[in-house]
Image (spheres, grey):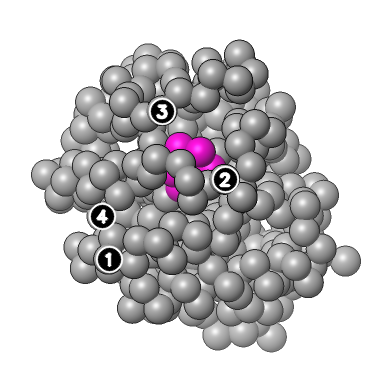
Amino acid sequence: MNAPSAFPEAAANQTIINGLSVDVEDWFQVGAFETVIERADWDGLTMRVERNVAEILELFAKANAKGTFFTLGWVAERYPALIRSIADQGHEIASHGYDHERVFNFTREQFAADIAKAQAILEDTSGQAIKGYRAPSFSIDQRTPWAFDVLAEAGYAYSSSVAPVTHDHYGWPQAPRFAFKPVSGSDLIEIPVTTAMVGGRRVAAGGGGFFRVLPYAFSRWAIRQVNTQEQRPAIFYFHPWEVDPDQPRVENAPMRSRLRHYTNLDRMAGKLADLVDDFAFGRMDDVAARELLHAEPWPQGQGA
């Protein structure tokens, strides 16, 4: 028998509400720079996250859009007033782990400790119950299906930690494109980041660098494809540093990483404004409540 759902029963809604999410981390905490910036040095660097999140909150307020802020515990420790401000404006606070360590670098026990630490900090600073999780760098994949068991045991209601594509930094191309139940006997659901179909092939279309680099018309087309052809919500994500063209430059990072990180930062805010004007968006917990009605078991996602 399944455990009781952590969500209230979702009412049918003809308007598809897409998931709007922000992965709250600073410019120096990204996976692209992890080989050139040590965690021990983070506190000595110029922090931009407070300024950048404030800009995002203003953009969302102008559009009357609500979203989910998947936040590092490390950030919440240092900026508790910022986290409270996000929550007070009606957005969901969810977990991005403590310090952006990828899941495949943990044992089960270490992962459990990481999410417990982040959850305690986020609940204390936000005043919200934390029921959503996103793995840093979408690092729940074929190597770490056991992470779903740990999340279910910890009482999480949903995860949005899988990128069902092939990519050099992440990806689980065999995973379903839409919400699935990865743990037998649990209502925990995984809601993968959005992909579109081009010529019978999956392509990433859920935000981040793809949104910045490619023309806005592609993202608009992809979200419309998911909404109209699949009748499912799109899951969109981005980071606060992506609206910040004035952030410090990491000159000793690999060229590919620098190109991915810095391309079109000056255009991101405008593209985001267009996005939230063109589509209906909402919090991930609300999307999860509706997707729970459609999510099917996917046994391959279960940990052994």
Label of residue 81 in the image: 1
Give the alpha-carbon distance from disc 4 to disc 3, as whole Å. Answer: 29 Å
On screen, 214 above or below 109? Answer: above
Horizontally, is 3 left or right of 5 in the view?
right
List the single residue furthest toward the right: 304
Q: Name the residue nearer the viewer: 51 or 164.
A: 51
The span picked out in magenta is 25-29
Q: Mark 4 points at which residue?
A: 66
The residue at the point 59 percent across, 79 percent down is 155
Give the alpha-carbon distance from disc 4 to disc 1, as whole Å. Answer: 19 Å
Pinpoint residue 194: horizontal percent, then vertical percent: 51, 39
Residues at circles 2 and 1 in contact by the CB criterion of under 8 Å:
no
Secondary element at tag 4: loop
Pinpoint residue 63: horizontal percent, then vertical percent: 15, 44
Amino acid at pointer 4: Lys
Residue mark closest to the camera, 4 vs 2: 2
Q: Earlier in the sequence, mark 4 or mark 3?
A: 4
Give the crowd class for mark 3: few <14, some 14-19, many >=20 residues within 10 Å.
Answer: few
Q: Can residue 261 be seen in this view?
A: yes
Horizontally, is 252 left or right of 107 in the view?
left
* Quadrant including the N terminus: bottom right
Quarter-wise, where is residue 46 in the image?
A: top left
Amino acid at pointer 3: Pro
Q: Which of marks 2 and 1 is nearer the N terminus?
A: 2
Q: Mark 2 points at which residue?
A: 41
Residue mark closest to the camera, 1 vs 3: 3
Residues at circles 4 and 2 in contact by the CB criterion of under 8 Å:
no
Amino acid at pointer 2: Asp
Give the crowd class for mark 1: few <14, some 14-19, many >=20 residues within 10 Å.
Answer: some
The residue at the point 37 percent across, 17 percent down is 264
Give the alpha-carbon distance from disc 2 to disc 3, as whole Å. Answer: 15 Å
